[in-house]
Amino acid sequence: MLGATASAVWLTDEARELVHALKYRGFTQVAETMADSMARYVRRPDADVLAPVALGRRRLRSRGYNQSVLICRKLSQLWRIPSAEHLLARTRETKSQTELTPDERRDNVARAFVAESPAKPDETRVIVIDDVLTTGATLCAAAAAVSTAGWRDVTAITFARAMPLETKVLLS
């Protein structure tokens, strides 16, 4: 299952604007900025591979790219850790998570991923890469697939993380 998670920044209005520019407005160069922030603010982990969260075929076709793959490619260069872009695959299309409750998010992505087994017996450490961590439902579902495939040490790193309510209240 999923071990530690780390994020470069809190999901502030500014970070959300970057995420939306990448995901919904086609500004793919923003992925490099996100990866630069991740490399700067998250300690380089010990890992055998980086694995981006997979998109469903329909969403990939409509968007034209997977934002997690773009982030992962740049992060792979910065950290000199190989990117395994096809390690994770979606087994089915899922609804957008944006308007779902935490329980609905978990149900939506449950068993939505499959993963490739490690290519070498000594490859056991994988880091799942995504743009945003909100409830953790997507990352947990992806990590479950990776663990089932035989990876023993599964962690995750994202560009942004949703702020806990207590933190939002303190900052407002």
Image: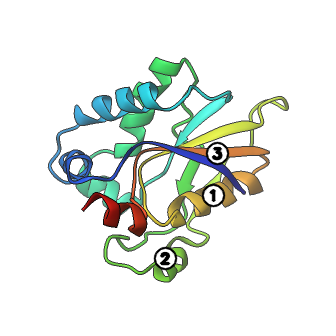
User: Closer to us: mark 2 or mark 1?
Assistant: 2
**Picture coordinates of residue 60 (x, y %)?**
33, 53
Residue assigned mark 2: 108
Residue shown at the point (52%, 70%) measured from the top left: 109
State which tag comes first along the sequence, 3 or 1: 1
Residue lying farthest to the left in this orientation: 25
Disc 1 is placed on an element classified as: strand
Mark 2 and mark 3 lie on one chain; the one further toward the N terminus is 2
Please give the residue where the numbered disc 3 appears in the rendered image. Answer: 155
Q: Comparing marks 3 and 1, which lies closer to the viewer?
A: 3
Residue 150 x %, y %: 79, 48
The crowd level at tag 2 (other Cα within 10 Å; few <14, some 14-19, many 20+) is some
In the rendered image, the vertical position of residue 12 relative to residue 34, given as above or below: below
- The amino acid sitting under disc 3 is Thr
From the image, tell me which residue sits under label 1. 114
Q: Secondary structure at mark 3?
A: strand
Closer to the camera, 170 or 122? 170
- Split into 4 quadrants, where in the image is the N terminus? bottom right
Q: Is residue 9 above or below residue 89?
A: above
Q: Amino acid at mark 1?
A: Val
